Image: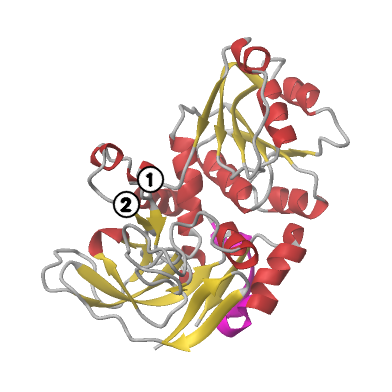
Amino acid sequence: MKALMYYGKEDVRLEDVPEPELKPGTIKIHPAFTGICGSDLHLYFDGEQNGGNSKDTPHPLSGETLPVVFGHEISGTIEAIADDVHTDMKVGDSVVVEAEMACGECPACKAGNYNDCPKLGFIGINGWGGGMSEHMVVAAERVFPVGDLPLDQAALIEPFSVAYHAVRLIHTEPGQTALVGGAGPVGLLLGTVLKAKGLKVIMSELSHARKDKALQSGAADLVIDPSKEDLLERVRTETDGRGADVAFDAAGAEPVVHQLLSALKAQGSLVVVAIHVKPVNLNLTMEMGFGEKLMSGSMGYANDHADAIKLIHDRNIDLSTFITDRIKVEDIVDKGFRPLREDAENHVKIIVSM
């Protein structure tokens, strides 16, 4: 079969590889669409930095070294189900793949928080197949039906579940005000989840194109450009002087963290969803101690896919608004990786088909 293999920095190759075989406890899937994630861009342009495996070092769970089949934001249709799998799903059903791999034995895994596994890896990054292939075989517990949701939109369920998990980490109530820093892909999906849960969403964003996308998609009620307007004062005006109830960092930039903390109400909560590649300097007493503000991190998802899919159906969420291009796998570098790196403000999600 054909599959896109990731060899390392700026090295992906469409190759013929052996077709995976159905094994006990698994489901065989024909991938339809695979989204390009920010982590895919880092892997392509920067290499496998701390990715968990390399050309010489196997991942502790998959046992695979590079190259591996690429792609972890996966939608597709069921081709076959192992005889020992008891499920209501059937051949031909539309499904998505939960891409995390975890050991199942550590304290975090046993507590159900397998996204905090010290050996955490991802299908399509660290092995076990990937979405940019003609066929893949996945453990049955990682396969979720999506009903009549179009498969192009279903490819966004993986990043949508990341946003859903981040919101689930803290207490929110309808009518509250949420402040989201950054209107990139994760920020837009955070806003979509928050709006679906009845919160008012204010976004902070510099890019004109991303500001327009946040408003046009309905992911935000209000978008503020902090380079042109005092974010703290505007948030206070919008909340009768109280401040935002909750905030989410989807930007990964130190100035945004300071701005979000300052705009939070007393005892408000900030969730860091973005990946920060540089340390952030905080005055813990002044920025968090006064006001008793809380900060937490969020990583991936755990037991979120089913509930995220239900929310999409219940609220009739249209994820197609976030798809900015559909490309073939052979064009992934010129029409996928490069546009997302060089013209990021005009793209949300580019999805790839075989």
Does the residue at mark 1 contact the one at mark 2 (Cβ under 8 Å)?
yes
Range of residues picked out in magenta: 318-332
Position of residue 170 measured from the top left corner of the image (x, y, whole percent)? 46, 29
**Kind of residue at disc 1:** Asn
In percent of the image, x 57 and y 26: which residue is there?
176
Q: Which mark is residue 102?
A: 2
Q: Badge 1, how many Cα within 10 Å: few under 14, some, many 20+?
A: many
Mark carried by residue 104:
none
User: Does the image show residue 315?
Assistant: no
On the rendered structure, is 297 left or right of 142? right
| Quadrant for the N terminus in the image | bottom left
- Which residue, as the protein is rendered here, is positioned at the far left? 84
Q: Is residue 106 left or right of residue 243?
A: left
Q: Residue at x 80, y 22 (%)?
A: 233
Compare residues 72 and 279 and report the one nearer the observer: 279
Reading the chain from its start, which is encountered first: label 1 or label 2? 2
- Read off the residue under disc 1: 115
Image height check: is 78 above or below 283?
A: below
Secondary structure beneath dot 2 equals loop
Q: Residue furthest top?
A: 290
- Is 331 in the magenta? yes
- Amino acid type of the residue that numbered disc 2 sits on in the rendered structure: Ala
Is 144 placed above or below 129 here?
above
User: Looking at the image, which residue is at 32% across and 65% down?
Assistant: 63
Residue 90, horizontal then vertical, whole percent: 23, 72
- Along the horizontal axis of the image, is 80 left or right of 241? left
Tell me residue 195's x, y (percent). 56, 40
Quarter holding residue 267: top right
Q: Residue 115: percent from the left, percent from the top?
A: 38, 45
Choose between 241 and 121: the one closer to the eye.
Answer: 121
